Image (tube, helix red, strand yellow):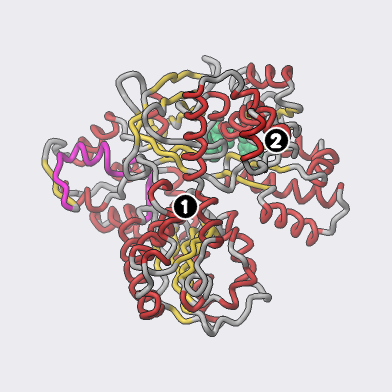
Amino acid sequence: MNAALKSLLPAPSLDADRLALLARLTQGLAPADLYWIAAYSAATAARLPTHAELTVVAQAPAGTSNDPAQRLTIVHGSQTGNSRRLAEQLSASAEAAGLPVRLLRAGAYPLRELAQERHLLVVISSQGDGEPPDDAIGFCEFLLGKRAPKLHQLKFAVLGLGDSSYPKYCAVSRALDARLAELGGRRLVGLGEADVDFEEAASAWSARALDTARQALGESATGAQPGRTLHAVNEAPVRPLHGRASPFAAAVLENQRIVSRDCEREVRHIELSLEGSGLRYEAGDAVGVWPRNPAQLVEQWLAVLKLDGASEVEHDGRRQPLARWLSENRELTRLTRPLVVAQAEAGGHDELRRVLAPGEQAAFSDLLATHQPLDLLRRFPAHWEAAALVAALRPLTPRLYSIASSPALVGSDEVHLTVSVVEYTAHGSAHLGAASAFLAAAGDDTPVPIFIEPNERFRLPTDGSHDVIMIGPGTGVAPFRAFVQERQAIGASGRNWLFFGNRHSRHDFLYQVEWQEALRSGALDRLDLAFSRDTGGRTYVQQRLREHGREVYAWLRDGAHVYVCGDAAHMARDVHEVLLEIAATHGQLPPDEAKAWLAELLQQGRYARDVY
Ligand code: NAP
């Protein structure tokens, strides 16, 4: 760079490695390309939500949002992004109403400020067994624990997101709501609960919560001038053109089977074009896919229910043929509690009613695990009118896939996914998963409606000299392909260690050639494998972790970050237990200290999970 120009610029916060990389990247470029990079960087910086969150606090004008009595704090705890999105909408509405707001992730909430908080809204989801999202574990533990302060000045409201098919539905939000009241807080509005199709319930609760918050904040806040609120921080550039509600129709660049012909399950590597979308992503983010239900499934529904797909149905202000409702707008592959209730009532089935009784949770869970809705319709017949059916079925929701590519390596105009196709036979007929079947069949003529779901919790260390340990069996390996690509592209000097497992080394060693090449080139330092069905006994990734426990602990002690991606119900739990075991064995930590050590890693973001 020209020395005179350099002297005019402030000292960068980039380290020497990144500066060298930047110099290499820009060497010899034409002025137009250099300007393009400058504009691209500025646009990327403007879109960073963490940046927005930080600047909300930093730019709060004195006398307004820094004063707890004059400000509304909105905290979100999100695993898949829904609570975050709702909290962002709530924040935007509050700002539009002239309220000084600060919006924070639960993991970024300064706990010592809780005692001073006066107006607090919490939007939080509950995971499978009634657990908080990883990002909110510290927040919940503090609030529910002995150190929580008295909150007699606080006015609050809690909105919980959950899935009513699980026994501990909205357990986290219920516990937080009760605890905030127990500590002396007064409710602005009652606890809100929203099921998987959360939009309607959430927006009704948000409107009420905002209304009462506005009254509670009083005239001083409502009279605040827009210029003195935080408008500028969260405004336009943060919102990309395409999002969950307005997906981008992505062209399919590649759709390829990546397991052997003899493999019992199908896994596909899919490359989608983002060209012209304005969408940007980072390694660690996910793609949300709006699927269409398989055509043969829609036909089966119509046949079983003896309904005409061409009959027009009006619902929620929209009128279209029943077949279209079923294909594009209704959930047909996931059985839910509301549908079981509706079917039991429509058909007068006592056997179904019994399964729904409070003491029958095991039988109910078993029903959900072994039946798709169509199985239920066949086993417990009932008469349905088309309009009643559309009203009873849950709206179709997008499915998230962890991104398997780094924009730094493949370019920001494409995004890669690793998709395991859900396909099995049960109750005498073939069953498909909605999104995986849709993606498997996607090709030149079938663009895929997608959006980017950022995952701020699942990020590589900003300092590339830190080591990373990645644990991703099955398609859980997807984000680690992105991580390794990213670390290679930016020339990160830290070491990369991958634990991968699948059923058979000969059939489903996903991205085998790429990993071998990465080991050769030094992009990957270590690869440990666990193929569960190659030999008699089942070998899983956590066994490899345990075998290398001494080194795993040494890496972590020296600052490594550890990531887990894949199945939440079994694998992630077992890996968590083995990490505790490793801390006890190789760090000589008593059980309580091992737990505290791992909780601290989670809190610091050095232990991150992308599991569901
Ligand atoms: P999978 O069914 O999770 O199986 C992968 C390997 O893990 C198999 O060898 C399996 O062995 C083994 N395994 C089974 N139980 C285990 C346990 N308790 N601990 C450790 N390993 C265990 O593979 P998949 O079909 O590819 O599914 C991946 C999972 O990741 C799904 O739950 C998916 O929802 C989730 N996920 C995927 C993405 C993505 O973007 N694709 C992102 C996040 C999460 P056996 O079958 O031989 O017992």
- The amino acid type of the residue labelled 1 equals Ser
Does the Cβ of the disc 2 residue fall within 8 Å of ligand 1? yes
- The amino acid type of the residue labelled 2 equals Val
Q: Earlier in the sequence, mark 1 or mark 2?
A: 1
Identify residue for label 1. Answer: 365
Q: Depth check: give the residue in front, 189 or 370.
A: 189
On the rendered structure, is 301 left or right of 465? Answer: left
Q: Residues within 10 Å of mark 2 (few under 14, many from 20)?
A: many
Q: CA distance from mark 1 to mark 2?
A: 27 Å
Name the mark nearer the viewer: 1 or 2: 2
Q: On residue 541, which mark appears?
A: 2
Task: Write the start and end of the magenta stretch as one range.
Answer: 317-337
> So how many labels did they put on this image?
2
The answer to whether residue 569 is visible is no
On the rendered structure, is 265 left or right of 189? Answer: right
Q: Secondary structure at mark 1?
A: helix
The relative height of residue 462 versus residue 68 in the rendered view (above or below) is above
Residue found at x 52% / y 27%: 34
